[in-house]
Image: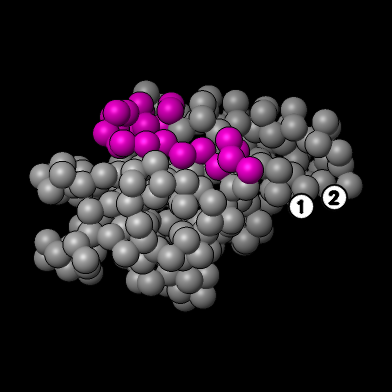
Amino acid sequence: MPITTFLFDLDGTLTDTDPLHHKAFNTIVARWGRSIDIDYYKTHIMGFPNNLIFDHLFPGMPPEEYLPLADEKERLFRAQLDAEIPPTPGIEALLAHIARIGGRSAVVTNAPRANAELMLKALRLEGRFDALVIGDELARGKPDPLPYLTALELLGSNPLEAVAFEDSSSGVKAASAAGLFTFGMLGGLDEERLKAAGASAAIRDFTAPALWERIGAG
């Protein structure tokens, strides 16, 4: 079946924002004399929704106490964004391919809507996708497959004619659990960790020959 539906994670997939998130989290936890190393970030933060992140960071802290911290962390992240940030190489060519074949696309992210909209604007990709699915606005975010199943429903598609792109274990688990052929984006995690989470293949960016072969444009 031809691939006509393309589902993209945002942070770490369409652009590399992990250093900005890592710095913002460390600003928060420094008040408790703590710091987050890169391995903890990759294992317990990357790709997860804020409720799970803060539950793990502050066991036993009630939501009414950690939610303001989560909101502050996101403000710290947004304050670091420049007016324009570099997209992952090859995305323009891939979006042009999607338009050429009359395909459909969506961004599927655990980022808050304010973050996602600001990032897409800074990437100059605002309005280039058919849907924006926000995990926090659903009953369950990634690693649950619900965000990807929701995107497929919104686009009137099914897993057999779709591919997903994810850079985190949480995101890869969500996409693969939804039955999607999932490209793990190399960067934050190596190929071994991406495939252990369920990635079908690992690529560096959207210029990878394996991607174009999969979608029948190689």
Classify residue 145 as left or right of residue 214.
right
Residue 56 got which mark? 1
Residue 133 got which mark? none
Q: Amino acid at mark 1?
A: His
201 drawn magenta: no
In which quadrant of the rendered view does residue 205 lie?
A: bottom left
Residue name at image x 39 percent, y 41 percent: 154
* Mark 1 to mark 2 CA distance (whole Å): 6 Å
Q: Secondary structure at mark 1?
A: helix
Q: Relative to residue 127, is residue 145 depicted above or below?
A: below
Residue name at image x 39 percent, y 49 percent: 152
Looking at the image, do the residues carrying marks 1 and 2 touch, with CB atoms under 8 Å apart? yes
The C terminus lies in quadrant: bottom left
Q: Amino acid at mark 2?
A: Pro
128 drawn magenta: yes
**Which range of residues does the magenta coloring cover?**
117-139
- Alpha-carbon neighbours of circle 2 within 10 Å: few (<14), some, or many (≥20)? few
